[in-house]
Amino acid sequence: MSRAADLERAAGRHERGRLLTGNAAAAWGASLADVDYIPAFPITPQTEIIETLAEWVADGDIAARFVTLDSEHSMLSAAGAAAAAGARVFTATSSQGLLYGFEMLYAIAGWRVPLVLVNVSRALASPITLEADHNDILAARDSGFLQLHAETCQEVLDSVLMAYRLAEDARVMLPALVNLDGFTLSFTREPVVVPEAAAAAEFLPPYEPNHAAIRGDRPMAQGPAVLSGLAYSYFRYQQQLAQLNALEVHEEIAAEFAARFGRRYGLVEPFELDDAEYVLVMSNAFATKGKEAVERLRSRGLRAGLLRLRVLRPFPAAAIADALEGRMAVAVIDQNLAPGLGGITYQEVAAALYDRPRRPPLLSVIGGLGGKDISDVEFDAVFHDLRRAAAGESVRSPRLLFTQAEQERMQTLLRIAGKGAKP
Amino acid sequence: MSAPVTAEVAAIKNLKQIAREEFILPGTAVCGGCGGLEGLRLAAKVLGSKTVYINAAGCFTLLAVYPYSPFKGSWLYTTMGGAAAAAQGVRDALDVLMARGKLPVEDDVQVVVVAGDGSTYDMAMAANSGAIFRGLDFWYFCYDNESYGNTGVQMSSATPYGARTTTTPVGSAARAGTEHGKKDLFEIWRAHQPAYLATVSPRYPVDLTNKFLKAKGLRGPKLFIAHASCPTGWLFEPKRSAEVAKLAVQTGIFALKECVGGAVTHTHIPRRRKPVEEYLRGQGRYAHLFEPTRNDAALRLIQEQVDRYWEAAAKAGAASS
């Protein structure tokens, strides 16, 4: 839809929001950030973002320059270099694309230039597939990029705006990844309140490249070799300190965002946690399923709750430990798998809790790989495990979610492929 | 995309007309006798100080080692495969910032990729193709020392037939060393129809300077393949670098040429080409072609390739005196 038509349809409906896909919400975020430059490369399920922005640029609705590159490595090279030249840059990718450009993530973070990269999560090959899990975005967890993970289409838009403020803050100066799940958010329409451009501009003023720019009157060497552990360690430690600064800066920005727009985003989001005894830890769109399960179990009298991880880098260890300490039992549901280890965020949550005296039994659950559903019966099983763990019983962890019905359907596929047991 | 932006600059006729001001200062970590750096030093005299050098991983990454840079212009080290894409980002950023009134036009800079042959001929082939295809207004300076020099002289697709490298060693089963012929990057780039394309040699500074002057008047990709005589990789005394570079041209192994609007012009035609042996003999990377026994077949092949090249050039009528 053209932007003019979209705006017209939305007229008078700002209170409740308009129906936007997660991808469209990301494009709106870039538009409201008044970005200068959008280097692009298509990949499912991200492509709608760049298609939308290409159309707005073609229609003259936004002043950004849009260029299609020849790969994600080139796209991220162009994005990082444009940020190093002093432009506000937006780009987006997904899955294989993020991995194809992976070298550049570390390079850009080391350049200490701010840009926002939206990743639309999609499980990694092999086998190749299209729907979401988080092995792509979590592979980038050590890259130096900040990471904001969105649960809803509204949060996608809001997080893009917040990510620019965070990335461009003089105390941070790091690039940011905003993650949304492929299909479950990217192609799903939800009501989204799109801020007025003037209000967005007040929240996010134009970028002033005081740290790094490429200009004829100010020659500057960026990204030079160091060739010593001395200088290398110094600059790496600077990234760590900047990431830690971002914890505090995020809270400032979140408070300002809430005051302006009425929507409050923390480093983590507590859901029904006040009196909760049995707690799930989840992230991204499937957290909505977890919240539904919590409500269902509460209606049965179980004191269930959920902690949603929103800011993954910097890792808000203290906020997580504060939220989980003293519970009867906690299960971290990872929509990712580090083969040979288990769930990725489980390890990090466990580390956050380690030095707390009242740390709860902590279970690891793997589910939702490649977009596979997590059904009611599976949530029920997780809560069953939590009660057993709280009672001191031994519980298998990590638990790999796969229902009996799914196992039967898989057997059918295996038989068709000639690999299963003969009927 | 490749329309002239200014009238063609008058060509210079002799060395004295080359600017005396230096834009790359001495004292860097690259090897003594590096022909590539001499070429870039001469190029920089035309490019001036309002430049940003976008570097791909290679020997020249050692030019700017924190906290020093020899350049009067700016520098951005990128990766091995993405320098031209980074050049796209910088050029686009400067253009949009000027268009939006965020950057004064007088603070614009020229964007110059500096990359070796390992990056240019191999890893960055696609990114370079993309940048040229998009008509990016930039300079590309490939210092071609015919190997992955910075990692200790391994074979690249720019390594010529018969040269020994550390990954194409000479043995009883591999008498020639490198068995592949050098990739014809000039023709690959020519097929992209860039605004300007040329080969340059540090030993032909007037020719080099005139090519950069001519390209300066053109908007679009301005691509240079610079013969980079390499004492460390080719195994000769650093003081002989200029001589080796000159012999490459005199034997016809390295052809000085340019391409504007698709037509190739040879800017220097060695009238009486010296035998290729004169170039090969002085370099340790070719020593196995002479000792302990002479490899006549390999030497003949190299000579014939050169002869065929110049016959074809003469036939195509591309040569001009």
Image (cartoon, helix red, strand yellow):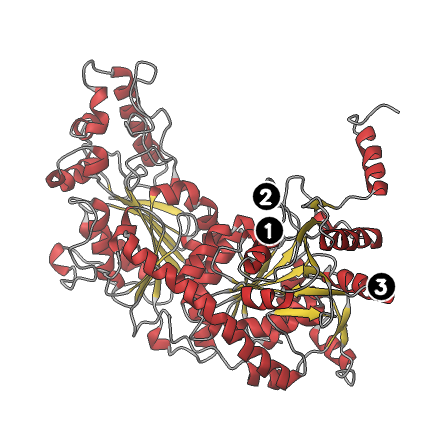
Say the numbered circle drawn on residue B264: none
Secondary structure at badge 3 equals helix
- Left or right: residue B30 versus residue A10 is left
Image location of residue B76, percent across then percent down: 35, 60
- Left or right: residue A66 versus residue B228 is right
Q: Chain of mark 2?
A: A
Residue tagged 1: A344
Q: Are marks 2 and 1 in contact (CB under 8 Å)?
A: yes
- Mark pair 2, 1: CA separation: 8 Å
Residue tagged 2: A341
Q: Are marks 3 and 1 on the same chain?
A: yes
N-terminal-most mark, 2 or 3: 3
Q: Chain of mark 3?
A: A
Res. A28 in view: no
Going by the numbered disc 3, the residue's amino acid type is Arg
Quarter residue A408 falls in: top right
Report the residue at 38% width, 64% height from top.
A238
Residue tagged 3: A296
N-terminal-most mark, 3 or 1: 3
Secondary structure at badge 2 equals loop
Image location of residue A276, percent across then percent down: 73, 67
Q: Nearer the viewer, mark 3 or mark 1?
A: 3
* Quadrant in which the C terminus of chain A is drawn: top right
